[in-house]
Amino acid sequence: METKIRGRAIFILVVVIGCILGVIGFPRNVQELRENLHNRIHLGLDLKGGTNLILQVQVEDAVNITAGETLERLKDELKPKNIAYSSIQADDDKTQNPPIHRVLIKGLPPDRIADVQSIATAQFSDWDLVRVPGDESARELVLKASAATTLRNQALMQAMETIRRRIDALGVVEPTIAEYGQGDSELVVQLPGVDDPSRVKDIMQSTALLEFKIVQGGPYPSREAALSDHGGVLPPDTELVPGTDEQSKNEVWYVLNRIAAVTGRDLSGAEPGHDQTGRSSVDFSLNRDGAERFGRVTGENVNKLLAIVLDNRVYSAPVIHSQITDRGEITGTFTPQQVQDLALVLRSGALPASIKYLSEETVGPSLGADSIRHGVIASIVGLLAVMGFMLVYYHGSGINANLALVLNLLILIAAMGYIGAVLTLPGIAGVILTVGMGVDSNVLIFERIREELRLGKAVGAAVAAGFEQAFRTIIDTHVTTVVSAVILFAFGTGPIKGFAVTLTIGLIANLFTSVFVSRVIFDYVLTRREKGAALSI
């Protein structure tokens, strides 16, 4: 019996040592001890202070881009098959919510309608080819509702990941980025320790929609001059985009192809650099598909201007001297900091859609310190009150319960340090609730032992029966509560997840301390107890 107890006691000692090391590490002095404690326990926004942002992803932008790409793909499919048409243009119905995206094809030969249907079925599975009432020579590609919903959901998820990569690259510790609300394409972004979020916001909201477009006219000194040069009406499939003259720094305008040769989605990398004149620039590389398309377009347009468009503004428009494939550079009037930020944004991936800020709230560090102080005071007062009650009501056995309770809290703090969990104010509430659950488990066991003693059983038999009979009830209550906490973690955000994490870890630790550790202590006391002596309970 004593050998069995000794083995269990050694296991408990190993757990205690592991937990202590998880909290304090291997400090060589008091200063290092404080640093270890500070670094191992990550504080959430409500305790550390920082910024809370709620933003909305304009997911319809992503659907519009896909519709534009489909329009160009359709032209590319019809041309080699010699299928004539008078025009192909977007024909979206924006009066609906959500909008219905359509591509209208006019002037199709009646004998080639079947061929167009075959192309639509084979190459555009997310679209339906439908008749246009009153015009037998016209057809419309209509984006399926399910496909549009998928594109919107993908845009939201991609925006979350892109924002996360950008924030991580800036060194913000333990940010929270999650969906906010249901069906509104809204995100909540929490940045602990960031009390001046202006640069972070600039980088987050920068769409960084990089496009390379062939210049059809310009640069013009004004918008009116550009329109006048084309008789007041732009050529089909072109657009007017502003830029800055690199010499005079005045605003100029360019007439560009509406559809880009390649976009930021074709990038495989981007790094800060310098051009031949020593100016700051961004060197980029393209993936295989992007390099193939870029090589074809630049090869067909040698000696023409190629506009480098970032967020619908021309940053530079160099002459294409020869075919360009997988590498290039973006030049313009950049500062070194702007180059660093632009390379970061492009490297982390372009946002699939623009974002709109709905609210911003800053939590000061002093408010976070007050929350920590009040939370710690509440935890200590609650713990001391519970421990005092256990000593008064259960006498010597109350010491057993208190030792298990202290070990429970030690395991909880160590586990959060090991896994890098974030402690929030609701998380402190989860710690307090864990204390209550721990006491509840001990009360169940002790009351069972009392019942067995009142029935006349020997002390050893009463202790064994008390633990065995209470075990099932403890398991049931803990499992159901852990399941609830897991659901909170899965669907909650920020502080709610912090509550779920501390509650789950605390409950699992409580099963170990209240059932295993407490039983070992009882068994040890029984081996040292004089025969016939009463149990202090």
Image: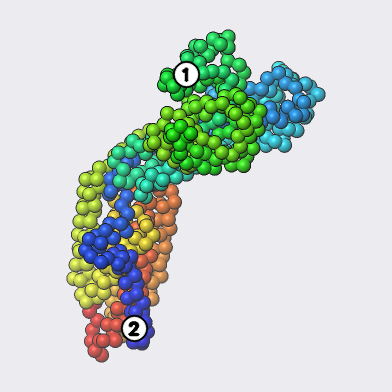
Closer to the camera, 9 or 536?
Answer: 9
Closer to the camera, 240 or 248?
Answer: 248
Dots 1, 2 in contact, CB < 8 A: no
Q: Which mark is residue 387?
A: none
* Tag 2: amino acid: Arg
Q: Image check: 295 left or right of 492?
A: right
Image quadrant for the C terminus?
bottom left
Q: What's the residue at 51%, 28% (across, down)?
A: 309
Residue 43: give x, y in percent of width and height. Answer: 30, 52
Q: Above or below — where is 70 with respect to 375?
A: above
* Tag 1: amino acid: Val
Q: Image check: 528 left or right of 8?
A: left
Q: Quadrant of residue 213?
A: top right
Q: Above or below — where is 31 with respect to 102?
A: below
Instruction: Let me know if residue 409 appears in the view.
Output: no
Q: Image check: 298 left or right of 402?
A: right
Q: What's the residue at 36%, 43% (across, down)?
A: 190
Q: Above or below — where is 400 with respect to 58?
A: below
Q: Above or below — where is 75 with respect to 223?
A: below
User: Mark 1 sits on what residue?
Assistant: 252
At mark 2, the secondary structure is helix
Image quadrant for the N terminus?
bottom left
Q: Which mark is residue 6?
A: 2
Closer to the camera, 501 or 255?
Answer: 255
Crowding at mark 1 (Cα within 10 Å: few <14, some 14-19, many 20+) = many
Crowding at mark 2 (Cα within 10 Å: few <14, some 14-19, many 20+) = few
